[in-house]
Image (cartoon, grey):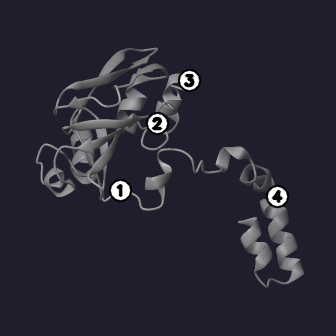
Amino acid sequence: MLRTLARQSIPKLQLKGAIRVLSGNAVRFNSNNFRVNTQSHVWNYYKEGPQYVKFTNEHEWLAVHKDDSAFIGITTYAAEALGDTTFVELPEVGVTYEVGDSIGSVESVKSASEIYAPVAGEVVAVNEDLESRPQLINEDPMGGGWIAHIKLSESADAVAAKEELLDEEAYEASLSEH
């Protein structure tokens, strides 16, 4: 943001005021914490974003991409219900799972919970960051806390039509029933 402001033809007085207001953020903006790792597995999907996101009644989310692959994780609701995550058991890369198969688990100070495959497919990558930083599940469950990336056994269009997968509105409604 600061670089954008500096490039615009803003009178010096306004720019100086903007820098003063934003100066607290300048250090954070330039830190390594906010730089995208272009070597990461997720980078290929970062700009494009998913075609759609679906949810399960077991509180998993599924972000489906146009190459018939999907990222899987647990929802914010599930992460909050579990409490502070202490360990994440990840699925094995190269293994094909069917709908409903256990693909791993999340352990917390409160309990442990299985993660179920919301769709059938082969695991092509796992979030290895969770091995050393399981708290990512709590910090960003629907982003940096993703668990697995799978190649779908069927097309993204076929997955979108599955009645057992909920859109955001239906998932939110199911939460209000609890």
Residue 176 rendering spot, x and y as whole percentages: 25, 41
Look at the numbered discs 3 and 4 and tell me whether their residues touch, using CB distance below 8 Å. Answer: no
Query: Spatial distance from mark 3 to mark 4, Cα to Cα?
Result: 33 Å
Task: Answer with mark 2 or mark 3, whichever residue precedes in sequence.
Answer: 3
Tell me the amino acid under the disc marked 2: Gly
- As drawn, the label of residue 145 is 2
Task: Answer with mark 4 or mark 2, whichever residue precedes in sequence.
Answer: 4
Tell me the amino acid under the disc marked 4: Ser
Crowding at dot 3, Cα within 10 Å, few <14 / some 14-19 / many 20+, comes out as: few
- Numbered disc in front, either 3 or 4: 3
The residue shown at (32%, 20%) is 113
- Numbered disc in front, either 4 or 2: 2
Query: Spatial distance from mark 1 to mark 2, Cα to Cα?
Result: 16 Å
The residue shown at (41%, 30%) is 79
Crowding at dot 2, Cα within 10 Å, few <14 / some 14-19 / many 20+, comes out as: many
Q: Which residue is mark 4?
A: 23
- As drawn, the label of residue 80 is none
Query: Spatial distance from mark 4 to mark 2, Cα to Cα?
Result: 30 Å
Q: Which residue is mark 1?
A: 50
Query: Spatial distance from mark 2 to mark 3, Cα to Cα?
Result: 12 Å
Crowding at dot 1, Cα within 10 Å, few <14 / some 14-19 / many 20+, comes out as: some
Tell me the amino acid under the disc marked 3: Ser
Quadrant of the image occupied by residue 29: bottom right
In the picture as drawn, the residue positioned furthest to the front comes out as 94
Task: Answer with mark 1 or mark 2, whichever residue precedes in sequence.
Answer: 1
Q: Which residue is mark 3?
A: 132
Look at the numbered discs 4 and 1 and tell me whether their residues touch, using CB distance below 8 Å. Answer: no
Query: Spatial distance from mark 4 to mark 1, Cα to Cα?
Result: 34 Å
Look at the numbered discs 3 and 1 and tell me whether their residues touch, using CB distance below 8 Å. Answer: no
